[in-house]
Amino acid sequence: MIILILVVLAVILFHYVKRIYSFWERQNFPYDQNSKIPYGCLESVAKHKKSMGMTMYDVYLRSKERFLGVYLLFRPAILVRDVDLVRHVLAEDFASFHDRGIYVDEEKDPLSANIFSLEGKSWRDMRIKLAPLFTSGKLKAMFSTSEEVGDRMIAHLNTLIPEKGTMKIDLKEIFTTYAIDIIGSTIFGLDINSFENPTNKFRNIVRLSHKNTHPAAILGMLLYLFPSLVKFLFRKFGLKNPVALEMLKIVKDTIEYREKHNIVRKDMLQLLMQLKNTGKIEEDDNFDAKVTKKAGSFIENISIETITAQAFVFYIAGQESTASAAALTIFELAQYPDILKKVTEEVNRVLAENNGKITYETLQKMEYLELCINETLRKYPSLPLMNRICTQDYQIPGSDKIIKKGTNVLISLFGIHRDPEHFPDPEIYIPERFLPENSNYNPKAYMPFGEGPRHCIAQRMGKINSKLGVVKILQNFNIEIMPKQDIEIDNYSILIVPKGGVNVRLSKK
Ligand code: HEM
Ligand SMILES: *[C@@H]1O[C@H](CO)[C@@H](O)[C@H](O)[C@H]1NC(C)=O
Ligand SMILES: *[C@@H]1O[C@H](CO)[C@@H](O)[C@H](O)[C@H]1NC(C)=O
């Protein structure tokens, strides 16, 4: 009898799953024929043979459709391949795709309520509040801090590299420390020097969050594919992100210290304190947060948890991406002597015109460097896969198909950026393709910072700090030319993480 019941249950389950896996066929959508029960197109992710970004790149390559249905475990989703349709999703028809659909629990877990995950009106309000953090005025005011970190990086490299001969350096590691220190000081207001003191508290916490392991990859997938289940479990067992809790302690201590000693610094924490105390950040470049802390006033209540959530996501979104852009630029320059020569000459010329001083403005004058950074972000978009969730039924333009509310939408930025239809010879590093007179690419297909109202909020900051890092290296060291090669992309990470680092040989000038 029991056996019979089990058999019946198994048959029902089998048919249920089968039915899910015929969803796109029933909807009459083009779909990925390679999907198999139970992983759908995610088998290589589940078996940790590839990252999510590279797995969806494979799906992108297998098809020529404008859009196609896929299965992510038991969730039907849509991969959009056509760049016009991508732009509809990200920009023109934002009203139907304004959320990312990943785990967030504003009410019970405010540390999860960061701008990247927030939805609907909460996201919009936060975006408007945070925008003044990233104006060029604010970035200029913080530039000297980045420069000091750059100098510490050079000092550190000078202790590693011998007087004569070359040395192999993992630039990814070096630039990660650089980016972490910049974020530590400009966002968290901490005086850390991870080059001299690599085991400081901040850097250590950060190592916790940095586990590119299989369980971490699975958790990441759950947060994305089953956000309501995660919310239920987190609430049920009172779970919190341990790394965010550590961050909370640091932010609390720093804010208390500043408020007690009336310290005002030109950094983002000061601006976030301003947001906490006054409900908004000033548009001008006044960093003072001591003003108008009236008890029981009109001021909207923004908690220290909410502030921490934002600072934390800036850390997560900012450091890996900035470090990769800088490291991979040098990595490519080391493979193309002509390009290396051209950019070095430009750097030397512009710096000579400015008495060797690097400023925010001098970096803007380096036009060829701009082409190089753009080409790096084309070849290696930090976020290889972007996502949205459909927030209201959407009829696909030029088609009779309807994307239903609640469907995940995926965009393989890596696939688009390496598609020869949009970028001829996509594997080759050609900064000149971006020159207006060549314009050897499809501008609609280029979106390293995303597109539309939810594009990267810190685009300028990311670019400036990557450029500064590259210029500091070019100014101080010779880069040894190496044979053409590819990086190996880590199998676990959401971002493009080069396995084994980014190794280049440097020597002193
Ligand atoms: C070279 C460096 C960087 C690259 C290539 C990059 C790329 C991206 C991309 C592709 C997105 C998704 C856009 C979309 O979905 O349309 C994004 C979003 C975001 N990035 Fe960046 N990023 C960089 C640096 C930074 C830095 C330094 C920070 C913070 C300090 C940052 C904070 C964010 C945030 C908060 C979002 C979410 C915005 C929202 O949902 O409203 N990024 N970034
Ligand atoms: C990823 O997994 C595949 C298959 O197991 C393996 O061949 C490859 O070396 C791995 N790549 C990395 C970067 O670990
Ligand atoms: C580089 O890319 C950005 C978009 O990320 C674009 O706005 C800018 O115009 C590009 N620069 C050049 C010189 O093409």
Image: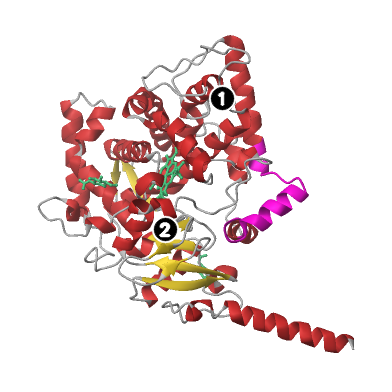
Identify which residue is drawn at 20% across, 23% down: 355
Image: 240 above or below 5: above
Q: Give the camera-side residue of 319 and 326.
A: 319
> Can you give x and y, in whole percent of width and height, for residue 155 in the image?
41, 31
Q: How many marks?
A: 2
**Residue named by callout 2:** 384
Q: Nearer the viewer, mark 1 or mark 2?
A: 1
Q: Can you say which quadrant of the picture contains the C terminus?
A: top left
Q: Can you say which quadrant of the picture contains the N terminus?
A: bottom right
Q: Quadrant of residue 174?
A: top left
Q: Secondary structure at mark 1?
A: loop
Taking the magenta stretch, the answer to whether it contains residue 212 is: no
Q: Give the camera-side residue of 183 and 443.
A: 443
The numbered dot on residue 300 is: 1
Identify which residue is drawn at 40% across, 28% down: 132
| Residue type for callout 2 | Pro
Residue 483 in view here: no
Q: Which residues are magenta?
A: 222-245
Q: Give the camera-side residue of 279 and 491.
A: 279
> Can you give x and y, in whole percent of width and height, for residue 306 in the image?
59, 33
Circle 1 crowding by C-alpha within 10 Å: few under 14, some 14–19, many from 20: few
Residue 329 in view here: yes
Image: 491 above or below 368: below
Taking the magenta stretch, the answer to whether it contains residue 238 is: yes
> Can you give x and y, in whole percent of width and height, for residue 96 in the image?
43, 55
